[in-house]
Amino acid sequence: SNPQPWSQRFEGALHPAIATFNASISFDIALIEYDITGSQAHAQMLAQTGIISETEAEQITTGLEQIRQDYRQGNFQPGVDAEDVHFAVERRLTELIGDTGKKLHTARSRNDQVGTDIRLYLRDQIQQIQGLLHQWQTTLVELASKHVETMIPGYTHLQRAQPLSLAHHLLAYFEMAQRDQQRLSEICDRVNVSPLGLGALAGTPFPIDRQFTADQLGFGGLYANSLDGVSDRDFAIEFLCAASLIMVHLSRLAEEVIFWASEEFKFITLKDSCATGSSIMPQKKNPDVPELVRGKTGRVFGHLQGLLVLMKGLPLAYNKDLQEDKEAIFDGVNTVKACLEAMNILMSEGLEFRTARLNTAVTEDFSNATDVADYLAAKGVPFREAYNIVGQVVKVCLADGKLLKDLTLVEWQELHPQFSDDIWDAIAPQQVVAARNSIGGTGFDQVRKALARATSILSSD
Ligand code: ARG
């Protein structure tokens, strides 16, 4: 018997270091169940088309099922000598059922096989990630519903800008997650295309039925061109792009949580279940969870970049370079899942908003200055003129160490005769937030509508 899984053309064995270098079994074992499912569909198709007998197909299917069970029970752990998961399963099958096992690879190549496996894997994982996103969105909605009336400073340039409903701030992340959901659904249509039956690169002379295997495996369509189909990894790049955007969104919130927890902001308290201490500074409570999420984001971006570079110079069709796609895809999947889970725990039970502090924070700044200008504009003063007047008001206040609400009516009226004693109501934070009742704004009524809309989105899928 030959020393390696391929043909008799070879006489010598691989250098052991090269065997290890060449092998993908250490990581592509993650595909084993998809590989088995794909092979079972292929074997049934071979029988259906009369390429092998029904009995042979049955033997193969049963043998493969045995391998699945053995693997699940930890009794099948192929080593480097198997090279990859595809060889490992085929070899084991032949050990189990004898020569019939050698018929499985009729009218197939590892190239269409591995393409099938990754697509089945990714389709599954995308569904799981969508489930986690759904949980994440539920957490955001639940938290938001508790904080419609809680106010938080809103920022641009990280400078206090206008006060917000905290729910509005949280629901911004709900919207991002909703786009992530849509993106994943769209990508899934392109993941879910069958390359099985394309052969090594050119198709096969056997009278196969590609539609049969595609239907068996739940694929929505077939690749039209064999060269394209065996070497296409667009779907994986698209997935990593969507994964990167999920990470961007988690990372932006992670960054906010990190500074909200700081002594400078004091907007939240981290609970012990989601914070860590320092080995030397006894007073410390560190936001490791959001920091790790922020940090892991870079790693997912790296996989996206890695795969783009991997593909850019590849001539048609399959090249071994493609074996490098797996760790990028697997780690991208695992990282996004882990981060969604961790952020979900952090936001649902790992922190508390300091509502009293938040509600006072918005009274201690000039984030109602726009509303003073709006006040004058509503009384007929052209907005730009009003804006300039308020600029002077702020300047005077800053010089006197006062806030807008501290000005007396006399002082207001010296600045402009249109000011009257309803000015204080107009610039109270509660009113400033409530007033922004335009569609998509932070006005409390809008936020309640947004919450209702988010809740109905969640219950509809
Ligand atoms: N382990 C290989 C991969 O991951 C499987 C396909 C191998 N095909 C080949 N012609 N060498 O890409």
Image: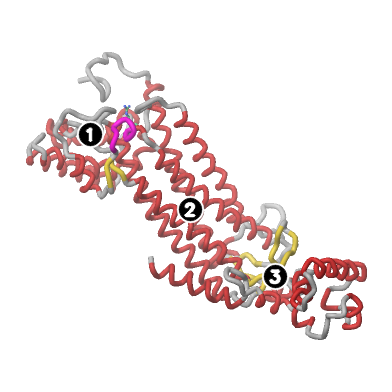
Task: Check disc 3 and give the amino acid type.
Answer: Pro
Residue 196 counted in the magenta span: no
Question: SS of the residue at dot 3?
Answer: strand
The vertical placement of 408 against 155, above or below, is: below
Q: Quadrant of residue 261?
A: bottom right
Question: SS of the residue at dot 2?
Answer: helix
* Dot label at residue 163: 3
Task: Check disc 1 and give the amino acid type.
Answer: Glu
Q: Quadrant of residue 404?
A: bottom right
Q: Which of the two labelled residues, at mark 1 and mark 3, occupies the earlier sequence position?
A: 1
Asked whether mark 3 lies closer than 8 Å to ligand 1, one says no
Q: Please tell me which residue is depicted at 57% across the width and 74% down the height of the picture.
A: 446
Quarter of the figure that contains the N terminus: top left
* Dot label at residue 244: none
Sort mark 1 into few (<14), some (14-19) or many (20+) by Cα contacts within 10 Å. Answer: many
Q: Which of the two labelled residues, at mark 3 and mark 2, occupies the earlier sequence position?
A: 3
Task: Check disc 2 and give the amino acid type.
Answer: Ala
| Residue picked out by circle 2 | 338
> Observer-nearest residue: 390 or 188?
390
- Per the model, the C-alpha gap separating discs 1 and 3 is 64 Å
Looking at the image, residue 181 sits to the left or right of residue 46; the answer is right
Query: Residue 360, image x and y in percent?
Result: 74, 75
In the image, the segment drawn in magenta is 224-230
